[in-house]
């Protein structure tokens, strides 16, 4: 199993609206990307300086599934939107088992 974790910081302009839109768009990928086995999307409530605005936690059967997700047209639409409203992102991908 492969786990894919991404954290995002969003621009201040329309932040709440953009966070909600990104969450909805990401969660919709569960219905359109066959290799995506599960996903959690969370909007941060921590006030710590090191906190990021949104976290994504997803699972795939294998690396090939993650690679298929990365180039899936519906995922690319979400990536395009998030890139337009985010200031930074961090990713961690790893294999379990």
Image (cartoon, rainbow, N blue to C red):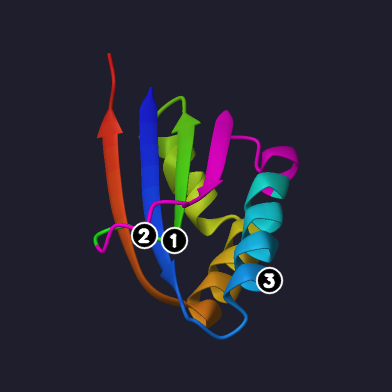
Circle 3 Cα neighbour tier, 10 Å, few/some/many (<14 / 14–19 / ≥20): few
Q: CA distance from mark 1 to mark 3?
A: 12 Å
List x then y, in percent, for residue 46. 39, 52
Location of residue 6 with respect to 20 vertically, above or below: above
Q: Is residue 53 above or below residue 2?
A: below
Identify residue for label 1.
Answer: 53
Left or right of residue 87, residue 82 in this image: right
Q: Residue at x 72, y 48 (%)?
A: 28
Q: Would you say the residues marked 1 and 2 are in contact, meaning their CB atoms lie under 8 Å apart? A: yes
Q: Quadrant of residue 93?
A: top left
Q: Residue at x 56, y 86 (%)?
A: 13
- The residue at which mark 2 appears reads as 52
Lower sequence index among marks 1 and 3? 3
**Quarter of the figure with the C terminus:** top left
Is 86 situated above or below 7?
A: below
At which x and y percent is residue 94?
26, 34
Q: Earlier in the sequence, mark 3 or mark 2?
A: 3
On the image, the x and y values in percent for residue 15 come to 57, 75
Q: Quadrant of residue 23?
A: bottom right
> What distance separates the C-alpha of mark 3 from that of mark 2?
16 Å
Q: Which percent across, then down, holds residue 36?
A: 57, 36
Q: Over which residues does the magenta segment extend?
A: 29-49
Q: Is residue 79 left or right of residue 74?
A: left
Q: Could you tell me if residue 46 is visible in this image?
A: yes
Asked whether 41 or 94 is in front, the reply is 41
Q: Between 5 and 74, which is closer to the camera in this rendering?
A: 5
Secondary element at image label 1: loop
**Residue 57 is covered by the magenta coloring:** no
Give the distance between the C-alpha atoms of the residues marked 1 and 2, in whole angstroms.
4 Å
Q: Is residue 87 above or below residue 76?
A: below
In this rendering, would 50 be left or right of 75?
A: left
Residue carrying label 3: 17
């Amino acid at each position: 199993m492969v786990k894919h974790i991404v954290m995002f910081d969003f621009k201040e302009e329309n932040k709440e609206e953009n966070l909600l839109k990104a969450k909805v768009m990401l969660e919709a990928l569960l219905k359109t990307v066959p290799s995506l086995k599960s996903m959690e999307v969370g909007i941060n409530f921590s006030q710590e300086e090191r906190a990021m605005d949104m976290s994504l936690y997803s699972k795939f059967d294998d690396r090939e599934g993650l690679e298929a997700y990365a180039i899936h047209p519906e995922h690319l639409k979400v990536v395009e939107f998030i890139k337009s409203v985010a200031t930074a992102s961090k990713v961690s991908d790893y294999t379990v088992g």
